[in-house]
Each structure stands twice: as C-alpha cells, then as structure tokens.
C-alpha cells in the first residue's frame, strides 16, 4: 500500500508540474547540510515599458484663405447704393457705418455678411504641455495710404489724408468678445502672443494595444472644444479715413499676410523665481533675449512694476547679449526686505516682444 501511494504521489507531482510549468521554474530545492549553509539565486528584471506623457496636441486651421481679405469704402458707396455691386440687400448685409469690410460667416446661407471685424481664428490646446501662441501680420502695397494707430487718430478736415486702421483683436473664445486691447498694425506689421494652458492629465489615460502602451485622451475628450481645453481666438478689425480724398490711391491694393505659430512653451525661453529671490532665465536666444530695462518685479501688495536695474547680482557666465543662453539674477537685500511676506512676480518682455513670468512667495 505504501509503494502504491508513493507511485501515485510521484505521478500526481509530475501532472502538476506539467500543468503549471511556471511552478516548476519557481520551485525551491532544499536539503540538510552542515555549517556554513549558503543559498543563492539568479534573477533578472524587465522594464514593462515607459510612455512619454509629454504630448503636444493642438487644433488650428492650417489655412484660412479669404478670412482677412477686406474692402475699403471710405466714401460710403456700398451704403449709398444699398450694396448693388454685391447683389443688393437680398444677397448681402453690410455693417452700418463701417468703412472697412471683411466677409464673415452668415446664419443665412443665401446671404453674405460683411463686417468691420473678420471671422475669428480659433486655436485649441488638447496636449499636456503649455503652448505659446504667436500671431504676426505684415502689410504691403500701401502706396500712399498711411497706417493709423486707431480711428481716433485719423486726420480730419483739410489735413485729412488717406489712412487705414487695421488691428488684431483677441478673445478667449470664438465668440468675438474682445479680451485684450486691440494691437494696431503699423507699416512694419504687428504681433500678438498668448500662452495656452495644458490639458489636465486626468483627461488622459494609459492604454495597451498592438503590443505597445500609449497615453491617450479619454474618449469623452477626443473631440473636446473650448469648454474642455484652453483656447485663443484672434481676428482683424479695421476702418479707413472717410474724410480724406482717396482719388490718388483708389487703385492701391494693400496685402496683409497673417501667420500663426504654436510651439511647446517649454522649448522656448523660461523664467523661474525662488523664494530666496533667485531669478533664472533659460533657453534665451539671439531673437528672444533679456533686456534689463524691460524686466520688472511686482508684489501682491506693492503692485507697481519696478524695473530690475539696480541691486541685482547678475550671473552671465552662460549668457551673452548677442546669443542668449542661461542668465541668473539674485535680488539684493533692498528687494527682499521690500517684498517680505508678499507673492512676488517677475516679468520679462523679451527682445522679440514675448512676455514670460514667474512668481514666488517671499517669507
């Protein structure tokens, strides 16, 4: 009976090992031995994988032909003729009292709308990194048409000359509600900038498919809009001087070129501020560099912006005025005592016109 039981047990152990080969790999062997008793095991480890969660994902129109085309009507001919050149009131609606017109989206498919402000171009950040937005415009073909800073600056009476006012207007969404003050185009053009905050990491999830791990937007956010993500919208608005004689420039054809660029904010110039007053600028370039006269501090109580021109110990070993690089600045005792107990912000307007900021609380 004992021999039968042993044979049965041996058979059962073989069956278990065949059914569970990993158990065999993990099985321990033991024995009784004398001193010293030593055991050992070799092992290896594998990295399951690592997924980059830094994602640049933006939504923007790559082309918007016609959006910024405009008509100048300083003499009010369109209104005087009820828009007959454009099919009359049955075919087109023109903004009352406007002198520059952009064709805009219309709720009535049978009609075209013309307004003094163009359609808004909207950009959206669905990625996990902050995004720098830069919008630049240039203008050519002005002939003898002057550019005005705003409509209030138009010349008048006998001194009136042909003048055009064009400006960027920006909003936080595509509704057209202006958020920033208009930025007028000069003969050299104009530029506006903004920073779009990154999407919250909770809007993403890890997935596994086709042999690899990925980090993707959750299904409910794949087609998300400005209700879910940071956005920025911009347009052109305009007017021309209706008091001037445009006879000599009536054949002028001003041409505007608008370019919008979105970049990973972390790849451009950055600034940090420690609570001990150390300012560190990184990724400065020849085009986007520091100018001490346009670098400021302000506090949560002492809110006036103060230029950083004195009582700052600058570290320039990794920075040059011509090439940029990394620049540090340690605020001196005057600043530190002045801002004690305040949340301090350092703001730098770089040489390319962009603005970078950082904040810290001084104890």
Image: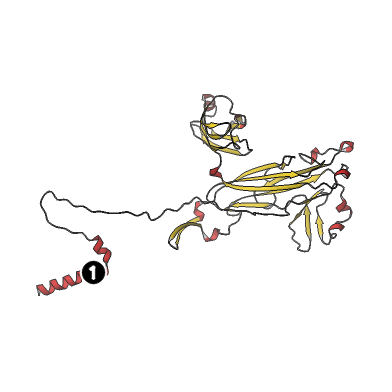
Residue at image location 35% in from the left, 55% down from the top: 46
Q: Nearer the viewer, residue 240 or 189?
A: 189
Q: Residue at x 30, y 54 (%)?
A: 44
Q: Say if residue 220 shows up in the picture.
A: yes
Decide if residue 70 is on the left or right side of residue 220: right
- Please state the horizontal and vertical placement of residue 223, each as a whole percent of the image: 58, 59
- Number of labels in the image equals 1
Q: Residues within 10 Å of mark 1 (few under 14, many from 20)?
A: few
Q: Quadrant of residue 343?
A: top right
Placement of the N terminus among the 4 image quadrants: bottom left
Query: Along the line of sight, which residue is nearer the eye, 317 or 269?
Result: 317
Q: Is residue 300 visible?
A: no
Q: Is residue 76 left or right of residue 147?
A: right
Give the side of residue 339 with respect to residue 49, left or right: right
Q: Residue at x 68, y 46 (%)?
A: 170
Question: How are the residues colored?
Answer: secondary structure
The residue at which mark 1 appears reads as 16
Q: Nearer the viewer, residue 223 or 360?
A: 223
Residue 335: x and y in percent read 54, 27
Whole-percent x, y for residue 297 in the image: 58, 32
Image vertical order of residue 163 relative to residue 340, above or below? below
Q: Position of residue 238 (x, y in %)?
A: 77, 46
SS label for mark 1:
helix
Quarter of the view holding residue 294 = top right
């Amino acid at each position: 009976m004992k021999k039968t039981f042993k044979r049965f047990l041996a058979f059962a152990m073989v069956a278990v090992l065949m059914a569970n080969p990993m158990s065999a790999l993990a099985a321990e062997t033991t024995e009784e031995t004398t001193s010293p008793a030593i055991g050992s095991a070799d092992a290896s480890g594998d990295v399951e994988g690592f997924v980059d969660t830094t994602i640049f994902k933006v939504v923007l129109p790559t082309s918007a032909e016609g959006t910024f085309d405009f008509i100048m009507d300083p003499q009010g001919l369109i209104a005087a003729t009820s828009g007959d050149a454009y099919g009359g009131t049955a075919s087109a609606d023109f903004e009352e009292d406007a002198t520059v017109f952009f064709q805009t989206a219309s709720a009535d498919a049978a009609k075209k709308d013309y307004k003094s402000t163009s359609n808004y171009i909207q950009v959206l950040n669905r990625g996990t990194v902050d995004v720098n937005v830069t919008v630049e415009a240039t203008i050519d073909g002005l002939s003898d048409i002057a550019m005005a800073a705003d409509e209030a600056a138009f010349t008048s009476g006998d001194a009136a000359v042909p003048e055009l006012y064009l400006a960027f207007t920006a909003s936080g969404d595509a509704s057209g509600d202006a958020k920033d003050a208009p930025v007028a185009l000069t003969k050299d053009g104009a530029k506006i900038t903004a920073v779009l905050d990154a999407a919250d990491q909770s809007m993403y999830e890890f997935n596994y498919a086709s042999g690899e791990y990925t980090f993707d937007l959750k299904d409910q956010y794949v087609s998300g809009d400005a209700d879910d993500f940071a956005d920025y919208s911009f347009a052109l608005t305009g007017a021309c001087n209706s008091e001037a004689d445009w006879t000599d420039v009536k054949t002028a054809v001003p041409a505007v070129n608008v370019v919008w660029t979105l970049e990973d904010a972390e790849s451009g110039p950055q600034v940090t501020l420690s609570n001990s007053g150390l300012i560190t600028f990184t990724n400065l370039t020849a085009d986007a560099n520091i100018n001490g006269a346009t670098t400021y501090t302000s506090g949560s109580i002492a809110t006036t912006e103060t230029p950083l021109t004195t009582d700052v110990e600058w570290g320039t070993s990794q920075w040059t005025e011509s090439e940029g690089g990394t620049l540090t600045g340690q605020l001196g005792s005057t600043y530190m005592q002045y801002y004690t107990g305040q949340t301090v912000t350092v703001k730098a307007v770089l040489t390319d016109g962009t603005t970078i900021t950082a904040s810290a609380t001084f104890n």
